[in-house]
């Protein structure tokens, strides 16, 4: 049940939710406005969004979270009209009213979206400033990349790292298909970052180590198509079919489910964790990230950048950029120089 509360804020007071609380419209036909009902939604139930599909949300209510009905259960809900313009995503903590029994065919109503601890965002591309929310309240990102087939791309991993650091999410890397190619030359690009790395091959999947890293966390899995992300998730969550919050399964709407994001519970000897799969997320534009945010993705260069002239753009043409000096005098080796190149491409 601990997944419901963040470890350092057990028993989130109701006021924490007030920001996004629904303001009920006065009922013009009644003598008194409906807002007289106080406190608002006192009978609401709190849960976590585990699936989203076309205006329907799967919300998991933890065991004991509802004093009236202590069962853990998955509830299908729609959003209250007042929340029409509020995005509700996987990982959101929401409050529900209406039929919260979770019985087949029942539909509850989301009336409040809780304050988000983190928000992983992306843009369609780097020029697009409209951000799309990928997941709320994740505290880790597992970047899945293959040693070969598809060929690993430094630039894509850089993007994931920037998005993670910008959102305050701790990155992890899992490199798959180490049976097909030596992963070390690729991993060398990231060795200075101190990001935990898992190496995986058929029959030698580091499942125990990954499970340990997932316990007590909400981890969003990202990766290019074909890297083996689904293979990994199926191995980590064998009963994914039952535990998922795929709204489609619940609502019976016949839509191909593999493109919708979902939160899956992973049970480990060290406690439960949540895995968020994002199969529909193909591009990872960073149009919404500031250059400071991008720099946060390059912690290995931070010390050098501290010595740059004030207001340095760190671009190729920047006068006296410390990054150029470090490449010239050998403080940065070939891998370091490649990191600078990555940074400069992202800063464009
Ligand atoms: N050789 C090798 N093949 C692997 C490994 N892991 C996964 N594969 C294969 O790679 C292919 C793609 O794996 P998936 O798990 O479907 O990849 P995915 O990342 O989920 O891809 P999408 O479903 O397109 O998002 C499958 O044929 C897997 O059997 C590995 O460690 N080594
Ligand atoms: Zn500079």
Image (tube, helix red, strand yellow):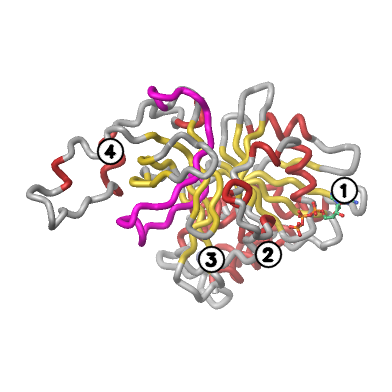
Earlier-in-chain disc, 3 versus 1? 1
Q: Secondary structure at mark 4?
A: loop
Q: Which residue is drawn at the image coordinates 52% and 60% (left, top)?
A: 54
Q: CA distance from mark 2 to mark 1?
A: 20 Å
Which one is earlier in the sequence, the residue at label 1 or at label 4? 4
**Residue behind label 1 places its C-beta within 8 angstroms of ligand 1:** yes
Report x, y in % for residue 163.
55, 56
67 in magenta: yes
Neighbor class of circle 4 (other Cα within 10 Å; few <14, some 14-19, many 20+) is some
Residue 61 visible in the picture: yes
The segment highlighted magenta reads 66-91
Separation (CA) of disc 4 from disc 2? 47 Å
Q: CA distance from mark 3 to mark 4?
A: 38 Å
User: In the depicted view, which residue is nearer to us: 155 or 71?
Assistant: 71
Q: Distance of mark 2 from mark 3, alpha carbons?
A: 12 Å
Secondary structure at badge 1 equals: loop
Q: Which residue is mark 1?
A: 178
Nearer to us of marks 3 and 4 is 4
Kindly identify which residue carries mark 4: 41
Q: Say whether disc 3 or disc 4 marks the residue closer to the N-terminus.
A: 4
Q: Which residue is mark 2?
A: 155
Q: Nearer the viewer, mark 2 or mark 1?
A: 1
- Residue 87: x, y in percent? 42, 57
């Amino acid at each position: 049940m601990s997944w419901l509360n963040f470890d350092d804020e057990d028993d989130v007071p109701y006021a924490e939710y007030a920001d996004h609380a629904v303001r009920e419209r006065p009922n013009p036909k009644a003598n008194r406005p409906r807002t007289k009902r106080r406190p608002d939604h006192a009978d609401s139930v709190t849960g976590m969004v585990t699936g989203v599909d076309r205006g329907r949300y799967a919300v998991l209510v933890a065991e004991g979270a509802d004093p009236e009905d202590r069962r853990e259960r998955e509830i299908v809900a729609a959003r209250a009209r007042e929340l029409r313009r509020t995005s509700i995503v996987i990982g959101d903590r929401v409050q529900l009213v209406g039929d919260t029994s979770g019985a087949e065919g029942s539909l509850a109503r989301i009336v409040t979206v809780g304050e988000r601890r983190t928000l992983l965002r992306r843009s369609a591309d780097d020029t697009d400033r409209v951000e799309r929310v990928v997941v709320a309240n994740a505290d880790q990102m597992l970047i899945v990349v293959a040693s070969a087939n598809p060929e690993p791309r430094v630039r894509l991993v850089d993007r994931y790292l920037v998005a993670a650091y910008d959102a305050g999410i701790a990155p992890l890397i899992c490199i798959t298909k180490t049976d097909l190619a030596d992963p070390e030359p690729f991993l060398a690009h990231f060795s200075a970052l101190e990001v935990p790395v898992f190496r995986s091959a058929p029959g030698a999947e580091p499942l125990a180590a990954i499970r340990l890293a997932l316990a007590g966390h909400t981890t969003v899995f990202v990766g290019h198509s074909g890297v083996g992300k689904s293979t990994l998730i199926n191995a980590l969550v064998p009963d994914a079919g039952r535990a998922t919050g795929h709204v489609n399964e619940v609502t019976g709407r016949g839509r191909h489910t593999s493109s919708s994001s979902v939160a899956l519970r992973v049970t480990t000897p060290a406690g439960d964790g949540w895995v968020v799969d994002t199969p529909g997320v193909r591009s990872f534009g960073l149009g919404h990230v500031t250059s400071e945010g991008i720099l946060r993705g390059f912690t290995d260069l931070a010390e050098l950048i501290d010595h740059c002239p004030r207001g340095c753009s760190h671009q190729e043409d920047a006068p006296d950029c410390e990054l150029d000096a470090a490449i010239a005098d050998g403080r940065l080796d070939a891998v370091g120089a490649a990191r600078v190149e990555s940074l400069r491409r992202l800063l464009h």
